[in-house]
Every structure is written in structure tokens, then in C-alpha cells.
Image (spheres, coloured by chain):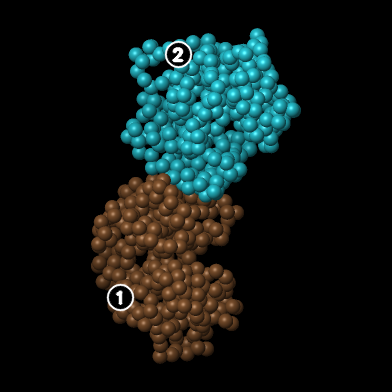
Chain colours: A brown, B cyan
Amino acid sequence: MISKSEKTSVLIVGGGALGSVFGWRLQLGGCSVSVVCRSNYEIVKNSGFQIESGKFGNAVFSPDHVFSSFNAAIAECDFYYDYIMVCTKTLPNISNPADVLMGSPINQKTAIVLIQNGVDIEQYFHEAFPNNILISAIAYIDTKQTESGVIVHGEAISLQFGFFIPEQTETQRSTSSVSTDISLLETLEKHLIAGNSGCKILDNVSRDRWLKLVWNSSLNPISVLSGGSNTKEMLANPVLCDLIVAAMMETITIGEAVCKMPLSPTIASSDIPEYLLGSVRKRIKPVYPSMLQDYLNKRPMEHEVILHNAIKRADSVGVNAPVLKTLYALIIGAEKKYLN
Amino acid sequence: MISKSEKTSVLIVGGGALGSVFGWRLQLGGCSVSVVCRSNYEIVKNSGFQIESGKFGNAVFSPDHVFSSFNAAIAECDFYYDYIMVCTKTLPNISNPADVLMGSPINQKTAIVLIQNGVDIEQYFHEAFPNNILISAIAYIDTKQTESGVIVHGEAISLQFGFFIPEQTETQRSTSSVSTDISLLETLEKHLIAGNSGCKILDNVSRDRWLKLVWNSSLNPISVLSGGSNTKEMLANPVLCDLIVAAMMETITIGEAVCKMPLSPTIASSDIPEYLLGSVRKRIKPVYPSMLQDYLNKRPMEHEVILHNAIKRADSVGVNAPVLKTLYALIIGAEKKYLN
């Protein structure tokens, strides 16, 4: 049985490319970091994560504790975790994303931090854990697991996060038993800064999720459907660039209808696509978007939270989304073909 | 030097899956049929086409004359062909489609028959041969060349055709030196019927091209982009079915704006998609649309005449085409990736 230390306790669920790097920085930033690993459990338990980072150099990250399951992570500790960080892929078409935290009770004082792509990803956890604080987080990071336990991280690392506020009315919220104590966000911020990660507390995390989706809903599926093209290959093709811009503009229009405000406080909506494409053009190395990596490795893609949830929102707010609907249908077809 | 026989003389340019079967039926229907072959010249010259036909049984089709080039087909004959039938793919992004008839003069009494997919395919030939009659033809046939000179034909065989009428005003037409003598169509019809091919003379071939495009602009690119799915795989997927219907409806809307009339004289426009999908569902064997065959064999696809020409028309008549534009951009990207 593991006992509570003085440190802030963090449990990372999903010890892959994302969870390992943030776990590493949080440990260096003063936290006690436990990690639930699946396929790489044995190697991480024995030798830790071998991390090759462009920003931080090479290092071994040995978590304070490594568990092979969420149940073990709960059962073997006599305290509650301050934060449980969910760093798994969100595949609601395959199983309920909240299932990764099922089987053992979670203390109501534990904040659940969702570091996941897409929009409306919080609904699955909100329904399963209505009495826990949900912190919704957006990662800006360039990282991949090249082999079991070996993580290659680039230069970028930043976590932006804020409280998930359910869309019920203010009255409902004020009577909710879940209090959103800002110090929960500030503690996380403090440790991330101490661990040399970028971070930012968000007032309106939904808006920032939509802003990030502008990139994800366009470059991700288009990279897969254009025969598996990376960003350099896509951007060299003017017809594909036009399509990327069309998908981005559609996403912006939906997001603004949902959030009832411009997605960016500083960039005019019509300038967002060129701003994002400009940032990609500047990169020397081509980017392989996450869906493209999944496609190339014949793994399931996160099309539900990156495309389908956006399309459902488009339908509910009455915005046309013919480009996203086309991309979604083709991605579903292509995935079915390679998973079979 | 080959001399004129009593028979109607036909030169097939493009001795592939399409040209060989129609050449075969026309020869059996009483024509003298010459064929220009490229990659399969030697084998066809020596042994003819080996045809395995579900409808007609197995047979060898030995053309009256086999040439290795269009120039040879003209130079080695002391007469003019009654019909030159162009059965090549239309790839205006790679070269001018009319180039297949360049290099030797074509007698103005020769009718040029274009048996090709897509819309606005006649423009390339009309510009190059303004003084020749152009017959625009639509083939309904299920045929492929499985190896050099070996053709597998299914059950369907029909050729629908009519005069290409340039979009200039009636006044311009009446002053044109090209007379459209209906007997040119009737002679072709007579030989096709004698050769047991279905056939139909069309008053408005443009309208029928658009009707056929409803199938081609949807099933073709979607089969490629959904990871290479045949019709059975596509139709088993409701999300893909919705996309197919959306692409079909977009094509119908464009075609009706261009033709200024409903595309079908008998089927309500909104019923056309389900009518076409129903006909596909009835087939026992899955269909591999032509673009899918090209994709699987890493050959160029006919995206310009099947998608781009339709999109240009949509823009010129002010009809939105977001689905076709998305499909086109992705097809361009996917093709570039596999041709490289």
C-alpha cells in the first residue's frame, strides 16, 4: 500500500506520447506522478520512459509509481489523487471514453483533468462522474511514441485548461455540489511552470477547444484522405489548400454559433485559416497529424470527437457543414476498410 | 496500302477494354474495324483480343487491321474512315485529349465518335476539328482488360449517342459548314444492332451525359476516397450512402441548371439517387468503378472530366458544389501521392 506524500499527487491514465511528457514535466515540477500503462507497462515499470526531447534533451522519466490498470492505481494507494489526468484517445464509437476510470471509486475531491482532442469530450465524463470537478485541457505538443516506452518530443509543450462548465443554466450550476475552486487550476499551473511547460488558465475552455478544432477538423482528415499526405505535401497543393481553408471556415462558423462569440480574441475569423496555415508553413519538418499517424499504423481514428461532434453541433445550431460531413463519411469508410 | 472495302469503315482509337468490345460487335455487325493499339499492339496484332464475355461467351476478336499509331492508321489506308471512334481516357490535365488524333489529316467526311466519360469532353475535339461532325457517345458497359489483350466483359453493353451541338446560337449553327446528317447516326445504330449491342440515338446528348455523371461523380471518387471500397462495401455503410446521395443531388442540381430541364424524362430528380443505388444493390457482384480501378492500378484518374468540368459548370451557373469540390480536391491529393 502506497501512502500519501507531501507532494501534489497526479495519476496519469494513458502512459503514451502525451501522458508521459506531461507526467515527466509535472514530476520535475514537484508532483508525485503515477502512471497507468497498458501495452508498455512492463518496459516502463522496469526502465521508465526513454524520452528524446528537442526542447529538453534526452532523459529517462521514471514515474513515482507505475500501474497496469486503473483499478490497481486506486487499490494500491491509501489516499486520493489530487488530479487524475486522462490522456487516452477518445473513441466513443468503440467504447465509452469514461470507461478508463471505471471499476474503482474516485474520491470526490479528485479533479479529473481531460487532456484530449476534439469538442464535447467532457460529456462522457460529466455523465459518469457528476460530482467530480472536470478540468478540460488542450495540449499543444508535438510528441510520439516511436516504440514501446520510447517517446520522441519536439519543441512545443503547452497545456491550456479551465473548468468544464456544463451547459445547464446558471441556476443549476449554483445549486451544484461541485465547487470550482480556482486554486485547483492555479496549483496545476504552478507545477507545470516549475516543470518548464507552457500553460495557460482559460476562462472559456469551450471556445479554445473550437479554436484548436479549426486545425484538427481540417488538417487531420484531409491528410488521411489525400492518400496520406503530411503538411508539406498538402500545402504544396493549391487545390488541397483551398479545401483546408473551406473546412477551417466551416468549423469556425459552427464554433462561433455554438460559443456565441468570435473564436479568437485577437484574429479576425476570416484570417484564422491563413494564420494557422502560415504557422505550419514556417515549420521546417513536415507534420504528421494524429489521424494520419493512426491511419498509417492502422489504428482507430478520433473522428467522433474531431468531426462527428462538430457536425452534430452544426445540425443543432442550424449551420451547414457539407465539407465536414463529406470528410467524416469518407474517414468512416476509409477506417472501416483498413480496420477490417 | 489498304484499300476501301464495301463495308462501313470504323477506326477505333484506343484498343482497350471499351474499344475492343464495341469494335468486336461492330465487326460482327458488318463493319470493317481497324484498331489503334498502344501497349497491347504486338499481342493484338498477332493473336487478336481474347474476349471473355458474360453476355456473348468467349471469342477472339481479330480486327480487320491493327495499327500501332494513329498516324499509321491514316497513312496505310487510301480511303477515309466513315467513323473514327475515340475510346481513350480523357485526361486534359496531362495532355490535350484531341492529341490522340493529331499528326495526320482527318477527312472532313469522317465522323468523330467520342466514347468517353464525363461532361464537356467534346470541347477538346471541337476546337481541334471544327469541320468534322462530332458524335458524342455514352457507353453503358461493364468491361476491363485483365492482362494485355485479354478482355473480360460482363452482361451490359449499350451505346447511346447523338450529335454534339456546340453551345453557340442557332444562327451560328445554321451558317456552320458541318451538316449533321441523321443517317450518320442511323448507320451506326444499324451496325450496333446487327452486332447485338444495345443502342439509342439521343436528341440531347448533353442531358444524358449529365444523367450518367450522377453515377460517375459520386460512386467513382467516393469508392477511391473511402479507402478503395467497391459498391458492396460502400452501400453497406449508411454514412457513405448519405454522402453518395448528397454528391448525386449536387450533380443533378448542376446538370439541370446547365441543361435547363430535368435530367430524366421519367424519374423525378429527387428520386434519381435512390433509383441508381437500387440498381447497384440488385447486382450480385460488387462493381469497381473506373476511378477505383485506376486507383488500384496506380494509373491517372479521369477527375477533370468527371469532377472538375462539373465544378466549373457549377461555378458558371451559380450553383454551390461543396461536396464535389471536396471530393475533387481529395482525389487530386490522393492521385498526386500515388503517382509520385
Query: Looking at the image, which is closer to me, A330 or A313?
Result: A330
Query: Looking at the image, which is closer to me, B86 or A110?
Result: B86
Q: Compared to B61, does A228 lie above or below? A: below
Q: Position of residue B260 (x, y in %)?
A: 36, 25
Does dot 1 land on a helix, a strand or a loop? Answer: loop
- Both on one chain, marks 2 and 1? no
Specify the label residue A180 is tagged with.
1
Asked if the residue under mark 1 is in contact with the one under mark 2, i.e. CB atoms within 8 Å, the reply is no
Letter of the chain that mark 1 sits on in the rendering: A
Q: Amino acid at mark 1?
A: Thr
Q: Compared to B110, does A340 lie above or below? A: below
Residue A189 shows in this picture: yes
Crowd band around label 1 with a 10 angstrom C-alpha radius: few (<14), some (14–19), many (20+): some
Q: Relative to residue B267, is residue A211 drawn left or right?
A: left
Specify the label residue A188 is tagged with.
none
- Between circles 2 and 1, the one closer to the viewer is 2
Residue B200 shows in this picture: no
Q: Position of residue B9 (x, y in %)?
A: 62, 15
Residue B259: name its quadrant. Answer: top left
Q: How many marks overall? A: 2
In what quadrant of the picture does the C terminus of chain A appear? bottom right
The Cα atoms of the two marked residues, 2 and 1, are separated by: 82 Å
Residue at 34% across / 74% down in the picture? A199
Letter of the chain that mark 2 sits on in the rendering: B
Check disc 2 and report the residue beneath it: B178
Q: Relative to residue A319, is residue B9 drawn left or right?
A: right
Residue at 53% across / 77% down in the picture? A50
